[in-house]
Amino acid sequence: MNSGLGDAADIFGILVSVIIVAAMLIWVERRLLAVWQDRLGPNRVGTFGLMQVVADMIKMFFKEDWIPPFSDKLVFVLAPTIVFITMLTGFAVIPFAPGVGIIDFNFGLLYFLALSSLSVYSVVLAGYASNNKYSLLGALRAAAQTVSYEVFMGISIMGVVMLSGTFNLREIVEAQRSGWFIIPQFFGFLIFLVAIVAESRRAPLDLPEAEQELVAGFHTEYSGMKFGMFFVGEYLGITLSSAVIVTLFFGGWLGPWLPPLIWFCLKTAIGILFFILLRGALPRPRYDQLMTFGWKVLLPAGLLNLLVTGAVLLSLHG
Amino acid sequence: MTLIIFYITSAVAIFATVMMITRLNAVHGLLYLILSLLSVGVIFFLLGAHFAAVLEVIIYAGAIMVLFVFVIMMLNQGQATIDEERAWLEPGIWIGPSLLASILFAEMMAVIMLGGSAATGLVVNSKQVGAALYGPYLLAVELASMLLLAGLVGAYHLGKPMLKKTKSGTKS
């Protein structure tokens, strides 16, 4: 471990700022979607509607926190905390800047994959514990979708691992001094992007909570703060995903003139905006289309990308 | 410090496994199994096998267990199954398995007492794992991949619509 990493100031600062960013994203998303759809969005509470988040939070705290009598109570309460905890712990390996971060773990990339695959339990258990057919259908979709897209996600980033020769996220960033990995790994990037949208269950791939078919999917029975945890967990997921995309493909903290931390935050912010734009721009595919696309297009493409990267590397260095 | 964490984690693992066996509700049992796998992951990490620890979480806790929960959820059996389980798990059933398990436990204790600790405090990196897998264990890797391929082909065959049967019955 590096010195300067993981002291109390780092841990506390990262934790607080990440949660604030995730909460503010609720407002950012609503305002931006409104702009793109030629509306105004929430602009009444505070300057530019910035206090909307606070108003929403007050509303959520005072809502009746209802546990349905037909639910599996313990699991019902446990489910929303899982997404929150896994997504927050995921930030532990993110290299914000040289010397800023929580741990310098040799298998940081795999750690991220592990936590993102654990986060699916939140949705699956919520669907099971609600004992409601819409929730159950949403949970089944989430389980199948996440397990499938995890495969392509893992395969698509192996190209980056090959190029940099390490699973350590800090060393991956350092390996991009001569050029960002989005250029040699463009197809890997595309596959990873689709997979990570499916993995974080964001629109357009938000089939587990497709309102038109499934009421609200897995969180149909949730209200008050428990629903709020799912909600903030989703935004934490978006933030974590953009941070990982920036680290793997866009050179992390690297950049001219500005300090490294600013570069990292700027790039991550652009990633988050892109996620929101995706939601505003694309329609949701049918469920069977999603699965077919995954297994018949993304898997072969990912394997091909892996093979070509390996062959090129071997011919250059071998 | 590491020793204390090791004993705490081991206690969690053993407790979770016992709870997993004795739960009547299948999903609760699976939750304890996931907890048990996670604590085994932590133990791997403490022993310096970081790669194995992360893979334990990704593959066992993150993928295989999701499929288990998926199947149990799809069957969605309610109170009837719990009553059935209660009938199956009556105290008399425990004698045989506990005897066999205690023999194994005694053997393991004997091995540990005689041979000393296996933990060397060495941290294994991914390069060493890869070199070992594609060096001395290449044959095992190839055999495992063939087994997986056979499983894949078998699953594909089972999932294929039965074309011959549709002649007499309804369309598939």
Image: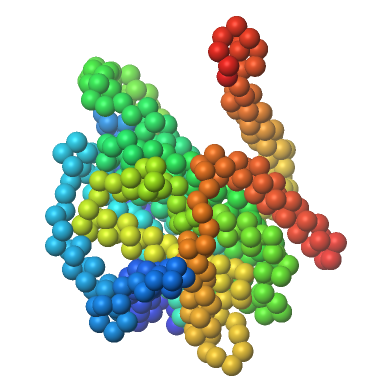
In the image, B27 versus A262, the foreground residue is: A262
Is any atom of residue B11 visible in this view? no
Residue at the spot 37% in from the left edge and 33% down from the top edge? B73
Q: Classify A280 as above or below B73.
A: below
Q: In the picture shown, does residue A114 fall above or below A276?
A: above
Residue at the limit of the structure toward the top, as seen here: B168
Give the quadrant of the C terminus of chain A: bottom right
Q: Residue furthest bottom?
A: A257
Q: Nearer the viewer, residue A132 or A251?
A: A132
**Please, is residue B157 above or below residue A80 in the view?**
above
Left or right, B91 with respect to A43, comes to: left
Q: Quadrant of residue A140?
A: top left
**Residue A315 located left or right of residue B51:** right
Q: Nearer the viewer, residue B54 or A216?
A: A216
Residue A141 seen anywhere in this rendered image of the structure: yes
Q: Nearer the viewer, residue B127 or A217?
A: A217
- The residue drawn where x is 23% and y is 39% is A72
Counting from the top left corner in percent of width and height, residue B111 is at 45, 38
Q: Is residue A192 above or below residue B102?
A: below
Q: Which image quadrant for residue A57?
A: bottom left
Q: Position of residue A117 (x, y in %)?
A: 46, 51
The residue lying at 57 percent from left, 19 percent from top is: B172
Residue B129 in the image: x percent, y percent? Answer: 63, 53
Left of A245 or right of it: where is A312?
right
Picture coordinates of residue B5 (x, y %)? 34, 58
